[in-house]
Amino acid sequence: MSETRERRALPSLLTAEQVECFQRDGYLLVENALTAQETAHYRAAILDLVPPGLSLPPHWRVMDGRIKPYLPHRDQTINTPALIPLMGNETLYHVMAQLHGTPRLHAFDGSVGITLRNDARPDEVLSQRLHLDASVPPEKDFLFTAEELQLGGCYYLTDVEQDGGGIHVVPQGHRLVEEEVRSARARGVNSRSLHGSWRNITHHRSVEVTGPAGSFVLMHHLMPHAASHNRRSLARIAYFMRYVRTPHAHGAHLPELPGGREYDAAQLGAMTPLTRRLLGLDPWDRTRGEPEGV
Ligand SMILES: O=C(O)CCC(=O)C(=O)O
Ligand SMILES: [Fe+2]
């Protein structure tokens, strides 16, 4: 099927108003990205990673009550057979394809953040500085094109109420970053090195994104964001994903590990044809002779 026909075959899950909100604000809460059963299943799969005696493996990271599990070999992509289907979730894929304007996407990340209640430093809201993730290699300039766009964010697998460790974002932050970069360039200033290479953004105000379990907090890659302290009893459980067009301007569609990722039989068995394409195991153009759609 041609890419144009594939595009026409895609469902539009977001309303025109939601698309407009995302384009204006640079973030959007997509509710019901998961059913209640899916949410419970993935939450349990993440909690199963935590050793019962709470003896956390030395290669996991814990910052201000925010636990970041790693698989052996220090891999933060948590793609166990129980969690791989979340990397290929069809609802979120269709949302991402609608916003990217193409069905041919690459999906990656799969990292987890469990934010426990933290009673320390009650005057502080953020547990991290507002930052941009390293979606554009530091030696490259921002392009501001669709080929560079990364749409990422996290599933909330628990209800996230105010002060419950929700991710913080800067409304319209993606536009503020673009304006600042363009104006720095016009003055001959190296825009990549501003604000500690965009890891330490202190001049914008942020808001916490709250939402029910099963939501996805969608963010533009130029959105300044940060983790916040959880002041509530309920731990916040989040699973992060990113989607880019393939090919992507800076090669984000290419395998993250030299030689590509290796999957065992249980992981391969948990993948749908869509998941295989999203993870780069099958090409998008191998559609001849297969049923239409994904
Ligand atoms: O856990 C969060 O809310 C955000 C974490 C984050 O942005 C990061 O670690 O880069
Ligand atoms: Fe981040």
Image (cartoon, helix red, strand yellow):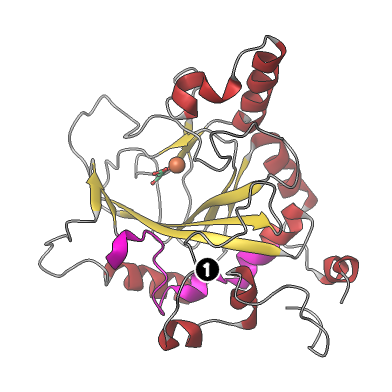
Q: Is residue 38 left or right of residue 173?
A: left
Question: Can residue 78 be spotted in the picture?
Answer: yes
Q: Which residue is mark 1?
A: 87
Q: Under tag 1, what secondary structure? A: helix
Between 237 and 112, the one nearer to me in the picture? 112
| Quarter of the figure with residue 21 | top right
Question: Where in the figure is residue 32, as x and y percent of width and height?
Answer: 57, 63
Coordinates of residue 5 in the picture (x, y in percent): 89, 71
Q: Residues within 10 Å of mark 1 (few under 14, many from 20)?
A: many
**Quadrant where the image shows the N terminus:** bottom right
Instruction: Answer with the quadrant where ligand 1 appears in the image.
Output: top left
Label total for image: 1
The residue type indicated by label 1 comes to Met
181 in relation to 93, above or below: above
Q: Is residue 244 magenta?
A: no
Q: Nearer the viewer, residue 75 or 92?
A: 75
Q: Which residues are magenta?
A: 70-94
Q: Is residue 145 above or below residue 38?
A: above
Q: Give the image quarter of residue 262.
A: bottom left
Residue visible at 61% across and 13% down in the picture: 189
Q: Is residue 71 visible?
A: no
75 drawn magenta: yes
Residue 246 is situated, as x and y percent measured from the top left of the image, at 70, 59
Q: Is residue 146 above or below residue 112?
A: above
Q: Residue at x 52, y 68 (%)?
A: 87
Residue 228 falls left or right of residue 245: left
Quarter of the picture holding the C terminus: bottom right
Instruction: Report the residue at 17% width, 56% height from top.
Output: 58
Which residue is at the front of the view, 289 or 157? 289
